[in-house]
Image (spheres, rainbow, N blue to C red):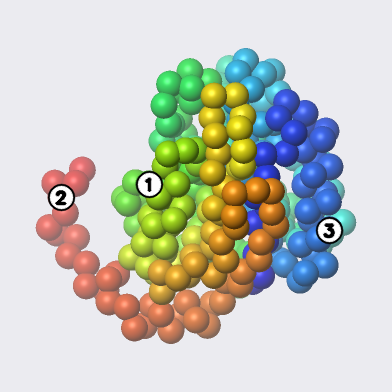
Amino acid sequence: MRTALLQSSGRPGSVVENLKVLDEAAGRAAAAGAGLLAAPEMFLTGYAIGDDIARLAEPADGDSADAVAEIASRHSLAIAYGYPERSGDAVFNSAQLISATGDRRANYRKTHLFGCFERDHFTPGEQPVVQAELGGLTVGLMICYDVEFPENVRAHALAGTDLLVVPTAQMHPFQFVAESMIPVRAFENQMYVAYVNRVGQEGEFEFVGLSTLAGPDGIARTRAGRGEELVFADADPVSLAASREANPYLHDRRPGLYGSLV
């Protein structure tokens, strides 16, 4: 499945403008043959927007979800995107997957909140593995800091995730995550990992870009630079099956030895 990564911070504070950016990128992605477009963490609203997070938060089936569904169905490609989700009095840092026909397929709430900023504005999610079938692949969702916990990604591997989509807001000086950790996560768990980042200065944060899609061989199939960019790579189930056959990690595990981890 050809996958497009939209490396952009959009227009922080404006859902309307960010939907326009998403629509334009969806058109370009569809024209290039992509079946999936992935946008960064908190793409619909912006990340460093303070109390506007709570003001702009919407339910998973809110107006913005309907707008993304319309974009997805009009361009005939699936879209994964980050947004602040309101559920009752709680606000979650969430990512949602909409199918190419406009159906809501999966919604994930970030389980590991990073730093005081996120802990002040969000409630942590409690479901570590969220998946949906898409284009012949099992697609999993995770957000930014979550992927830095090996237990999280291994849980996806054991649940059969083929392509892990990770909207992120990766900031300086932690660019080594994009450069080094993501290919390792893909290799050690035998999956594709699509890591799609914000860029530039936003409030107190400097986002580093470097969005990548890494394969099960640990090699980056594509890698963006430090500016706004739309990059493409393929998640190939045939190559994935061959890699899993050749790599013994998951087969050679000894779970009985790992009780001390929990």
In the rendered image, residue 39, in percent from the top left (x then y), is placed at 66, 48
In the rendered image, residue 52, in percent from the top left (x then y), is placed at 67, 19
Helix, strand or loop status at disc 2: helix
**Residue at 77% in and 47% down:** 22
- Indicate which label's residue lies in the foreground, 1 or 2: 1
Quadrant where the N terminus is found in the figure: bottom right
Three-letter code, disc 1 = Glu
Q: Is residue 258 left or right of residue 162?
A: left
In the rendered image, residue 73, in percent from the top left (x then y), is placed at 83, 56
Does residue 162 appear in the picture of this structure? Answer: no
Helix, strand or loop status at disc 3: helix
Mark 2 Cα shell of 10 Å, populated few (<14), some (14-19), many (≥20): few
Image quarter for residue 72? Answer: bottom right
Three-letter code, disc 3 = Gly
In the rendered image, residue 227, in percent from the top left (x then y), is placed at 65, 48
Three-letter code, disc 2 = Gly
Q: CA distance from mark 3 to mark 1?
A: 32 Å
**Residue at 82% in and 49% down:** 23
Q: Which residue is mark 1?
A: 148
The residue lying toward the viewer, choosing from 177 and 161, is 177
Quadrant where the C terminus is found in the figure: top left
**Residue at 56% in and 61% down:** 223
Q: CA distance from mark 1 to mark 2?
A: 20 Å
* Marks 2,3: beta carbons within 8 A: no
- Indicate which label's residue lies in the foreground, 2 or 3: 3
Helix, strand or loop status at disc 1: helix
The residue lying toward the viewer, choosing from 247 and 181, is 181
The residue lying toward the viewer, choosing from 250 and 166, is 166
Q: Is residue 227 above or below residue 15?
A: below
Q: Which residue is mark 3?
A: 27
Q: Which residue is mark 2?
A: 259
